[in-house]
Structures are given as C-alpha cells and as structure tokens.
Image (spheres, grey):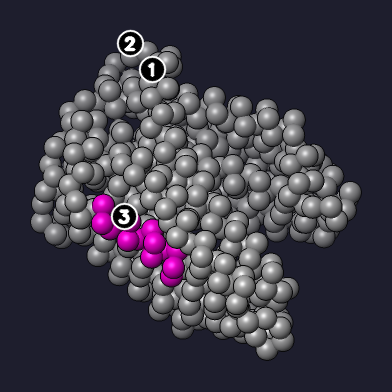
C-alpha cells in the first residue's frame, strides 16, 4: 500500500477515535461543573468518588483493546464469523465484569471512600462521596459494554459510530444531570443517577449496533448466547493488558504520593501539569487505536510487510503529533497555567512542568504508538512484563526526587521539574526502550498471525 493511502487510513481511524476519547472526559467535567454549584463539600465528595470510578474503568480498558485486536486479526484472516463471535463474547464479559464491580463497589463504598480520604475526611464530604459512588455504579455494566462494543467496531475499522454515540451521550448527560440535580432536587445523587442512565443507554446503543451488524453479516440464526470458551478466552487474553495497565496506574499513584511530599504548591502545580498531560495523551491514544486496528487486520491476513508499514507510518505520526503538541504546550505554558490557578508561585511552577512535558511529548507519541502496535499484534504478555520492568526501572528515579529534589520557598518550580523529568522522561523512556526493542524483532509478527 502506498504511503499516502496508508496515511489516509490512519487519519480516517484516528480522528474519529480522538473525538470519542475527548467526549468521555466531558462526563466528568459536566458533573464537576453542575455539582460544584451545590457546594464545596459536594464537589470534594465528587472528587473522591470519581477518582475510584475512573480508576476502575481504566483498569478494564483491556475490554476495548483485546476486542479491537482479536476482531481485526480474525477479519484480516477471512473469518468474520469467528471475529464477531469474539466480539459478542467480549461484550458478555464486559457485562459480567461490570455487574460484579457495581455490586462489590456499592457494598464497600463507605470503606473505599474512607480509605481514599484518610482519617481527616469530614463526615459530610464522605457522605456525599458515598452517595455519588452508589448512584453512579449501576452504570458500570453499561460503561464496560461501551468499551467492549467500541473495541469490536474499531476492529471492523469503524471509529465513527463510537464518536457519534459518545457525542450524543455527553449532551444528554448534561441535560439529564441538570434536571435530576436541580429540577428534581436530588442533589449529588442526581448527578450519579443521570450519568449511570446515560452510560447504560450508550452501552445498549452500541451493543445494538454490534448485534444488528452481526445478524446482517452472518444471518438471524447466529447465536448471541455467550460462549464459555470465548468469554474465558477473552478474560485470559485480557489479563496481561490488565497487569500492564495496573503498572501504569501504580506509577501514576506513586508519582502523586511523591508530589505530596514536595509541598502544597508543587502538589497543586503537579495536578495542573498532570491534567494537561492526560488531555494531550488523548491525541496520541487516537493514533495508537489506529495502529491497533490496522496491525491486527494486517497480521490476520498474514501480511507482515503491511504490518511493518503501519508500524513505520504510525511511529512517524506519533513523533510528529508529539512534536506539534509539545510546541503548543511550550508556547502556551503560562496562559494555560493561569487558567488553573491565580497564585503566582503555583502558576510559575506549573508552567515549568509544562515545559518539561513539552520536550517529552515526541517521546510519548512514540511510546503510545508502540503500545498500540503490540496490542494489535496480541503481544499482551510482553507488554505486561515490560510494564513491570518499566515500573521497577522508574522507582530509583522516584526515590531520587523524593530524597534529593529541592524543597522550600523559591524552589517550587525546580521541584516540579524534577518530578516530571522522572515521569515524562525516565519512566516513558523505560517503556519506550522495551517496546522499541520488541518492535525491531519479529516475535510480535509471529504472534499476530494465527
């Protein structure tokens, strides 16, 4: 395939995927804006509850990754029946996991909030957090079904449908939450209930799209009942990616823990930098999603040359996108920091951190794309071990920051710079070295052809 043609396919997948990735965080932003007008205690409670919810959803993102890769490979191999069977089983797995997480979460909500908030958590904030957690958790099966169904559609090279569903869901979420919170007077519980209903609706919509497409392709006689082997296989294939995601989450939590030891202002500045780092990562994740789908399709067709071509072009796009995003962050560092805090010292410290991640963005683009390529090839076991190795390699750098980073008045910017040099450069470089060396070999190509 010619380079311009491949570039068009990458962008045709990445741009709608980017829209869908950005639409989902709008749920949290809308909830924060609406709940914030109820009071400080309610907003603090939402912060604790949403942290737990986002962590849970993040840990099960493998439901999208594994279905994207497996469906893409099987379609490429000329087995649409097996591809759609894998997709249906992936959705059943998502519904089961979602129901289990919701049930356990509702039961242990007070304990989980108390553990996260610590001994100084006020009873009022804790009560609001538990209320939001318990009213929003019933939407977890829908949210995980969204991940699995989106993975199926991405494997079929359809990233537009998830974009439409995510966009409409974000709009409905805003209206429904406003009605429940203020119209019905349900308070923070109305926000959780509204979000849960929207998530269930989005899940039902995307599942219906997959079911309709499955029956149109394979006929109305195709069984939609779960296959025990298929569901078990999805869980088995997804477990390595669960571990890989867990190592990343541990690295993020440890970074926050070290940031808290640097002082109040560095911690606040870290939150600003971390928010913008996460937002910028959506664009790079969109390219990783395109790489997953295209590599899976190529290796399913046993076309190793095409898979290599996808690797080279998506790496180019990842580095280029990182360079552009980094340039924007560097140019707008101080204005962006000013949007988050009026404090001059915190603003300066945050801007320093933004300069650091601006330099690291091309590296991040390469790392994210390499992750996507190897996920598309079904190389989850390697990614799990690489995640563990990267976390172990990161710990000495975190220790250096914790023990030697400058502290005290006038040192806030330097402290933030040390912290983000450790995470955005050292940790990302460790991940990048491992995945790059893997991509230089041929083992991942063999794994993808099956």
**Local SS, label 1:** helix
Q: Number of marks in the image? A: 3
Residue at 72% across / 86% down in the picture?
Answer: 409
Q: CA distance from mark 2 to mark 3?
A: 43 Å
**Local SS, label 2:** loop
Residue at 34% across / 22% down in the picture?
Answer: 85
Q: CA distance from mark 3 to mark 1?
A: 30 Å
**Local SS, label 3:** helix
Judge from the rendering whether residue 110 lies leftward or rightward of residue 444; answer left or right.
right
Neighbour tally class for label 2: few under 14, some 14-19, many 20 plus, Cα within 10 Å: few
Give the residues drawn in magenta, as a range: 425-438
Judge from the rendering whether residue 449 lies leftward or rightward of residue 60; answer left or right.
left
Are the residues at dot 2 and dot 3 in contact (C-beta closer than 8 Å)? no
Q: Is residue 265 magenta?
A: no
- The answer, for residue 138, to whether it is visible in the render is no
x and y percent of residue 306 in the render?
14, 48
């Amino acid at each position: 395939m010619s380079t311009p043609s491949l570039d068009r396919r990458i962008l045709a997948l990445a741009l709608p995927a980017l829209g869908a990735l950005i639409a989902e965080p709008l749920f949290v932003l809308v909830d924060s804006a609406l709940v914030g007008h109820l009071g400080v205690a309610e907003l603090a409670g939402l912060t604790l509850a949403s942290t737990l919810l986002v962590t849970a959803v993040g840990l099960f993102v493998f439901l999208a990754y594994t279905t994207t890769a497996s469906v893409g490979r099987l379609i490429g191999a000329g087995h649409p029946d097996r591809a759609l069977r894998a997709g249906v089983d992936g959705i059943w797995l998502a519904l089961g996991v979602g129901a289990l997480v919701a049930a356990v979460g509702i039961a242990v909500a007070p304990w989980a909030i108390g553990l996260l908030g610590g001994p100084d958590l006020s009873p009022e904030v804790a009560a609001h957090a538990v209320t939001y957690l318990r009213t929003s958790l019933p939407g977890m099966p829908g949210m995980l079904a969204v991940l699995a169904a989106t993975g199926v559609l991405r494997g079929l090279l359809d990233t537009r449908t998830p974009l439409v569903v995510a966009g409409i869901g974000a709009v409905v979420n805003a209206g429904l939450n406003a009605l429940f919170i203020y119209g019905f007077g349900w308070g923070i519980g109305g926000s959780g209930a509204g979000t849960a209903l929207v998530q269930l609706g989005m899940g039902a919509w995307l599942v219906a799209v997959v079911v309709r497409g499955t029956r149109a392709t394979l006929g109305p006689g195709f069984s939609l009942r779960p296959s025990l082997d298929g569901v078990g296989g999805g869980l088995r294939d997804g477990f390595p990616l669960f571990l890989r995601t867990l190592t990343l989450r541990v690295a993020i939590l440890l970074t926050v823990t070290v940031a808290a030891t640097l002082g109040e202002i560095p911690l606040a500045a870290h939150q600003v930098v971390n928010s913008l780092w996460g937002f910028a990562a959506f664009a790079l994740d969109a390219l990783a999603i395109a790489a997953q789908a295209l590599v899976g399709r190529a290796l399913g067709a046993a076309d190793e040359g095409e898979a290599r071509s996808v690797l080279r072009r998506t790496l180019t796009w990842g580095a280029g996108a990182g360079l552009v995003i980094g340039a924007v962050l560097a140019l707008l560092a101080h204005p962006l920091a000013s949007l988050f805090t009026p404090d001059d010292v915190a603003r300066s410290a945050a801007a320093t951190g933004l300069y650091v991640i601006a330099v690291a963005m091309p590296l991040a683009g390469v790392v994210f794309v390499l992750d996507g390529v190897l996920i598309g090839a079904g190389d989850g076991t390697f990614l799990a071990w690489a995640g563990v190795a990267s976390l172990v390699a990161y710990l000495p750098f975190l220790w250096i920051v914790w023990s030697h980073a400058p502290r005290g008045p006038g040192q806030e910017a330097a402290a933030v710079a040390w912290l983000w040099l450790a995470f955005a450069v050292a940790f990302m470089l460790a991940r990048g070295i491992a995945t790059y060396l893997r991509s230089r070999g041929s083992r991942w190509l063999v794994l993808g052809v099956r």
